[in-house]
Amino acid sequence: MTAHPAPPRSAPTVRHPANPHRLAVGQMVVVGAAAALFLRGTTSGPWALFALFVGPEIVLLGGVLALLTVTYLLGTFTLHGSRLTERPAGRCAWTLALWAGGAVLVGFGRAALGHLGFDPEQHPEAGHWFLGLAVAVVVGLLSRSRQVRIVSAALIAFFVVITAALRTLT
């Protein structure tokens, strides 16, 4: 009997989703809604009462860790939404990039709203939804879909240009 050599093993292939646009938009919606609803829930209700007992810093730290964990898990469940979410280290970078980019855009947004005469302190819910929108646009910027990346980059550029123009006018 002659032994047949084993067939060569091919490198594992990564299956890409059939519709990366839908996956990218899904990531944007879920992360944006999670940001807005999470922040909305932390400024009132039982969390505010809990903060009286343990301190607002502890509640804020716990909230940040929970939000980062939820975002990381979303990246785990939607591996092919972005090139960064395919590996655990990339998901960590993706999670931190989303929230850092969202925070920067919110800073620009607060400046723009201030120049338009809108006081975000009087309407905190506007800030919650604005953070949700900012993070959603950053998710789109990091997505696999080229069309979603282009639209997200155009929205961010438009927003930054408008904010800069408002700052120079005053």
Image (cartoon, rainbow, N blue to C red):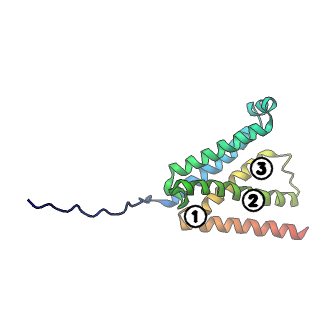
> Splitting the image into 4 quarters, where does residue 106 fall?
bottom right
Specify the label residue 104 is tagged with: 2
**Which residue lies at the image location 62% right of the left edge and 50% below the top edge?**
31
State the residue position of label 1. 148
Mark-to-mark CA distance, 2 and 1: 20 Å
- Tell which of 1 and 21 is nearer to you: 1
> Splitting the image into 4 quarters, where does residue 16 fall?
bottom left
**Where in the figure is residue 55, as x and y percent of width and height?**
80, 34
State the residue position of label 3. 127
Question: Which comes before the other along the chain, label 3 or label 2?
Answer: 2
Q: Quadrant of the C terminus?
A: bottom right
Residue 4, placed above or below residue 75? below
Q: Amino acid at mark 2?
A: Val
Q: Amino acid at mark 1?
A: Val
Q: Amino acid at mark 3?
A: Gly
Question: Which comes before the other along the chain, label 3 or label 1?
Answer: 3
